[in-house]
Image (spheres, grey):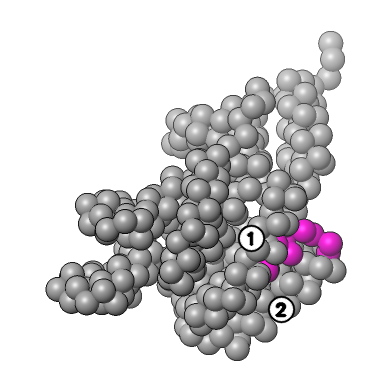
């Protein structure tokens, strides 16, 4: 009779698998996953270990979705199927497994831009963070929650967690990509605080490190964020120059997930500068890429641009877009887009309509400022 493989030895391999996932080492992660899958067939029975495997398989798929969004061409289960499978086992998740469940589920919700749901899961994971001994894992948690707080414009929450993540990553030797991302989040927060000089310092550091790593997607992301910094200062020529460089690299590397947001800002700039022909070209390409990667939010944002700038303003289309974003609690986006509408009407001396959308700006800003109240986890 063949001796069974111990679940402890398989657990060690799963920990190593997770290390590869965290560092985006896709080939190594795929090879080790296949090896673990074979070992499980010969392993002694251990339901907790099988749950751990299921959670890591879910995390593995989140990594793949980040690198190649929408790629379900393989025979592997989709991320939503894995999510349903884990949800069905939730009652059996206790201790550290409960931490992983909530942390990974928060990442999944974040990828879907369900930010309130993501923060709720992250806060539940934070309640179990004391069970985590690995400092890198703590850094991962702090980084991911800093990321979602940044998206929700909860600037000082985001800065707090990003700094905690950065301090821990700096103690490691193989997490330079995460250090770059921490600098990017901190720069984004300084941009939101209108402290552009501080933002530029972080962005230049991110670009320098990305170039040292020869990581082209990270270089493109740094260039894109430098463009955002210029965009927020109304320095459109410099913004467009950096966006175009970023887009070129994204396309070259097949990193198409980031194309919709770059094209959205390029389109917006051209409309604001009354370059309607150029705007139409960027609109068409950006809208196409939104559909290609299944990015419904940016698809909606392109519809908003169409409703505002292409022909007479279509208030029904504009309000539909704003209401959908409100339903997802994406108040910073509602604020920015309502401001564009208000300014458009003001420039065209439609002061009554302008006032209406300035009120929407004010309401969205209030909702953003009280956003921390939305994330409370029930005790």
The 10 Å Cα crowd at callout 1, few under 14, some 14 to 19, many 20 or more, is some
Answer yes or no: is residue 348 visible. yes
Q: Is residue 375 above or below residue 241?
A: above
Q: SS class of the residue under badge 2?
A: helix
Q: Position of residue 270 (x, y in %)?
A: 49, 66
Q: Is residue 197 magenta?
A: no
Position of residue 266 in the picture relative to residue 73 (left or right): left
User: Which dot marks residue 225?
Assistant: none
Residue 358 seen in the figure: no
Labels 2 and 1: the sequence-earlier one:
1
- Residue 204 - label: 2
For marks 2 and 1, give the CA distance: 23 Å
Residue 293, picture quadrant: top right
Left or right of 151, for residue 307: left
Q: Please provide the residue range marked out in magenta.
A: 213-223
Left or right: 224, with 249 as reference point? left
Spot occupied by residue 61 in the image (x, y as percentages of width and height): 63, 39
């Amino acid at each position: 009779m063949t001796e069974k493989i111990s679940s402890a030895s398989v657990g060690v391999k799963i920990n190593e698998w997770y290390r590869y996932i965290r560092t985006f080492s896709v080939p190594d992660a795929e090879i080790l996953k296949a090896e673990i899958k074979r070992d499980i067939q010969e392993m002694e029975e251990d339901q907790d270990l099988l749950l751990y495997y299921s959670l890591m398989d879910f995390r593995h798929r989140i990594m793949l979705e980040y690198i190649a969004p929408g790629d379900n061409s393989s025979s592997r289960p989709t991320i939503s199927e894995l999510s349903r499978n884990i949800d069905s086992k939730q009652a059996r998740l206790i201790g550290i497994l409960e931490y992983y469940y909530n942390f990974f589920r928060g990442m999944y919700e974040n990828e879907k831009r369900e930010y309130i749901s993501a923060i709720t899961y992250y806060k539940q994971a934070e309640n179990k963070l004391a069970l985590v001994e690995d400092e890198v894992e703590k850094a991962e948690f702090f980084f991911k929650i800093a990321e979602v707080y940044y998206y929700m414009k909860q600037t000082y929450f985001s800065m707090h967690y990003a700094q905690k993540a950065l301090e821990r990553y700096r103690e490691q030797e193989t997490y330079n990509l995460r250090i770059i991302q921490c600098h990017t989040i901190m720069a984004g927060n300084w941009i939101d605080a209108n402290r552009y000089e501080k933002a530029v310092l972080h962005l230049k550091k991110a670009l320098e490190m990305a170039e040292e790593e020869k990581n082209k997607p990270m270089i493109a992301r740094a260039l894109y964020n430098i463009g955002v910094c210029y965009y927020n200062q109304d320095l459109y020529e410099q913004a467009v120059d950096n966006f175009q460089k970023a887009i070129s690299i994204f396309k070259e590397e097949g990193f198409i997930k980031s194309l919709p947001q770059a094209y959205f800002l390029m389109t917006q700039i051209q409309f604001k500068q009354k370059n309607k022909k150029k705007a139409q070209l960027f609109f068409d390409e950006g809208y196409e890429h939104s559909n290609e990667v299944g990015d419904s939010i940016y698809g909606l944002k392109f519809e908003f641009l169409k409703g505002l700038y292409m022909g007479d303003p279509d208030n029904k289309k504009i309000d539909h877009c704003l209401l959908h974003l409100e339903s997802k609690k994406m108040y910073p986006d509602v604020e920015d887009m309502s401001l564009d509408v208000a300014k458009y009407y003001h420039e065209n001396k439609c002061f009554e309509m302008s006032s209406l959308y300035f009120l929407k700006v004010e309401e969205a800003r209030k909702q953003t400022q009280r956003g921390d109240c939305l994330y409370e986890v029930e005790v």
